[in-house]
Image (cartoon, helix red, strand yellow):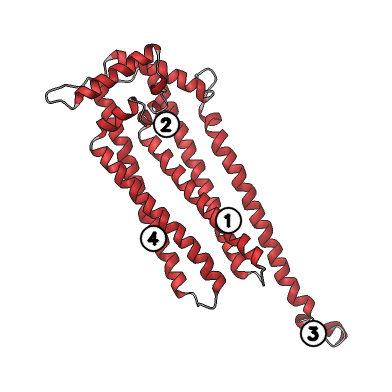
Amino acid sequence: MIAHHAGGIPLHNSPLHNTAGPSRSAQSSGRKIAALIALVAVVSAAFVFGPGMLTSRPGDGYANQGELVETVRAAFVEYWSSGVQAFSPSLESAVDYWMRYHVAKAVIAVILLTVLLALGRMLKASFVNAGPLTAGKKLAFVSAGGLVTLLAMFSSVLVMANVQGVVAPFSSLISMLPVAQADGALGETVGQVRQQLAQSTGTGNQQSPVLELMISDFARYHVAMAVIALIAAVLSLTVAVVVWVRFARTARSDRRARLGLGSIGLLIALFTLGLIVVGVANTGTAADPAPALAAFFDGGL
């Protein structure tokens, strides 16, 4: 009896037993959250530094952004002077590299988004299941949850932008050209592009083969974002509906859960609205890409 009851008090009913379980659970949850935060930092660093290291090769002229811009500058001038739609070898090499670069970025961004979603779920569970909290700790939990939600949204945008770069790497690449400060051969080329774009809207004016490809690829660039934004908006709207349904079904007495769901639901709803605006804007540009391309070469984008 003594061995089983420890002086007449059953061990499974003792205060030590009741507090040890929740304490261990809280410690385990804290360790998991810390591990996920560390993983977010590692993946974020990989997003910044990894793609260039993974996709560039020694001597290809893409070691850093400055070298890439100079390579693209020379390749674009050569391509425009050729007068044919087929990419010159130097430009084709740069476009291939840029596509690989965006593939790497998109994959890493998806990983980052996945980790952030896991961190968000862990924070929500810890907040809902935590014991009594001071006002300061409640604010800290809500702030952390909001920050993670915003970071997840930003990661979604990174995924979208890099998928767009994979679909239309040429337009993405020439967007790096310093057209506003163009001089020398590039300045002369940009002037010719501007002149042809200005004339392209006139009746009976024929476009050069290079300009035709530039306009069609620019349209594809914006079609890609319009489709991506539409898909993302549908997914985001679905998540928002699920969150608000859970909010409505949560008892009013469970203020902590309602606060978390309401905050996240509001952020997701605003994000969905932003995606719709992006989708509509890119649809309009894709329908008539020449003015937007002209605005870029005028230094307006």
User: Tag 1, which secondary structure?
Assistant: helix
Kind of residue sitting beneath label 4: Thr
Q: Is residue 186 visible?
A: yes
Considering only order in the chain, which callout, 2 or 4, is on the residue closer to the N terminus? 2
Front residue of this view, candidates 143 and 4: 143
Q: Position of residue 80 (x, y in %)?
A: 31, 17
Residue under label 1, please give it: 119
Q: Position of residue 160 (x, y in %)?
A: 41, 43
Residue under the point 31% across and 17% down: 191
Residue under the point 64% across and 56% down: 33
In 3D space, how far apart are the residues under numbered discs 3 and 1 (Cα atoms)?
38 Å
Label disc, if present, on residue 5 of the rendered structure: none
In 3D space, how far apart are the residues under numbered discs 4 and 2 (Cα atoms)?
31 Å
Quarter occupied by the C terminus: top left
Looking at the image, residue 135 sits to the left or right of residue 290; the answer is right
Considering only order in the chain, which callout, 1 or 3, is on the residue closer to the N terminus? 3
From the viewer's perspective, is residue 54 above or below residue 155?
A: above
Considering only order in the chain, which callout, 3 or 2, is on the residue closer to the N terminus? 3
Kind of residue sitting beneath label 2: Met
From the viewer's perspective, is residue 48 above or below residue 264?
A: above
From the viewer's perspective, is residue 114 above or below residue 60?
A: below
Kind of residue sitting beneath label 1: Leu
Residue under label 4, please give it: 238
The quadrant in which residue 124 appears is bottom right
Considering only order in the chain, which callout, 4 or 1, is on the residue closer to the N terminus? 1
Label 3: few (<14), some (14–19) or many (≥20) C-alpha neighbours in 10 Å: some
User: Tag 2, which secondary structure?
Assistant: helix
User: Tag 3, which secondary structure?
Assistant: loop
Residue under label 2, please give it: 99
